[in-house]
Amino acid sequence: MMNLALLTVLVALQTTIFFVEGFQPVKTMIRGGKQTFPRSTNSPYTSTTTTRTTIKMSATGFIGIGIMGEGMAARLLSEGVAGSEDNPLVIWNRTGAKCTALAEKFPDKKVIVKATAKEVVEACGVTYSILSTPEASKIVFEAETGVLAGVSAGKSIVDCATLAEADMIRMNAAVTGKGGRFLEAPVSGSKAPAANGVLIFLCAGSKDLFDEIKDTGLAAMGKASHFFGDTVGFGTRAKLVVNSLMGTMLAAFGEGIALSESVGLDPSTMIEVIGQGAIQSPMFNLKGPKMIKKDHSPNFPLKHAHKDMALACDMAKTAGVEYSVMEQAEKMFRAAREDADLKVADEDFSAVFEKIHKESTSEFSKKR
Ligand SMILES: *[C@@H]1O[C@H](CO)[C@@H](O)[C@H](O)[C@H]1NC(C)=O
């Protein structure tokens, strides 16, 4: 009894001190607190001060400032993971111009734009990368001035793109072959979750690297990080399962709404109904109202959604799993993507809805 009382007093006291001294809540400390970020000791990024003493500094790299990368890099800055004088954010993009926009958005932060991906990796301990397609990833990774060229012992590469498993395995072998560390880290979530730091990371590869960045970089950009083991490829497997389910759900939802419209049901009411039961989905709530208004401004381009669905179907075939419902959805997305009149490949993947209406002969669909 006495001990318990004493403990209670101590806890209360500690809590008081905690607030009196103005500490941030623990979560914020981990995300934003300066002291808690482990510094890389092998970064060659150096700077000469006015007293001409060269100090060893750390830097964080980010390659690919696109739909996803722009929000993710911004989170590294806004959450204080990178962007200080002694830990700048070092970036590179395929088309350079708008890279400076990121720096301009954060005038108080130190952002360095490099001329090549190689230079980013050379300057940083950890470099995050997210490019939109396997083709772009391959070029940026393998180019003479690319990511791999900058890798040396102790360098860490975190690849957040969704690629084929074989691509991830090849990159891992190349990076670790040069003494670096590699973490496969594809993300679940698109433009808005990237900008808001609520992505879900699906990781595999270097456990040490994962442990080093899960409470810093990954926590700044995501709401959850999962480690699927040290065998690279399992992160991609997880991602492909998620994305093929997502595309299939949206295609089915699109057909449901198209049928509702075509049999005289108010689509807005139907979206509400669907959103109230056990089949509710934030994705339906978000995309439904826009779909009926033909608003498909891209958060996740249809061509990329289709790419992931096709990769998932290949994986199912290899694994010997019956996947016919998902395959049917993949075919619908493929048809939408390849439809030269419709031109929705670069629109949001919700534009599969336009293909559904195009293939329908109902009065509503024809007049739409
Ligand atoms: C980065 O490059 C990609 C590919 O060229 C482009 O789509 C994107 O808009 C660029 N981002 C910025 C911020 O310039």
Image (cartoon, helix red, strand yellow):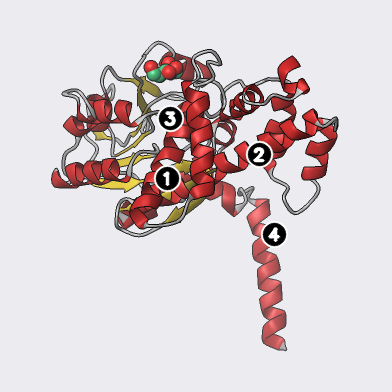
Residue underneath mark 2: 283
Residue 89, position as x, y percentages in the image: 39, 29
Which of label 1 and label 2 is nearer to you?
1
Q: Is residue 205 above or below residue 64?
A: below
* In-image side of 215 versus 352 (left or right): left
Q: Spatial distance from mark 3 to mark 1, Cα to Cα?
A: 37 Å
Residue at x 34% of width, y 46% of height: 184
Q: Is mark 1 within 8 Å of ligand 1?
A: no
Between 135 and 197, the residue placed more toward the observer is 135
Say which residue label 3 marks. Answer: 83
- The quadrant of the rendering that contains the C terminus is top right
The residue tagged 4 is 16
Local crowd size for mark 4, using a 10 Å CA cut-off: few (<14), some (14–19), many (≥20): few
Residue 283 is left or right of residue 348, and the answer is: right
Total numbered labels placed on residues in the image: 4
Q: Image quadrant for the N terminus?
A: bottom right
Q: Is residue 9 visible?
A: yes
- For label 1, the residue is 312
* Residue type, mark 3 in image: Gly
Q: CA distance from mark 1 to mark 2?
A: 20 Å
Q: Amino acid at mark 2?
A: Met
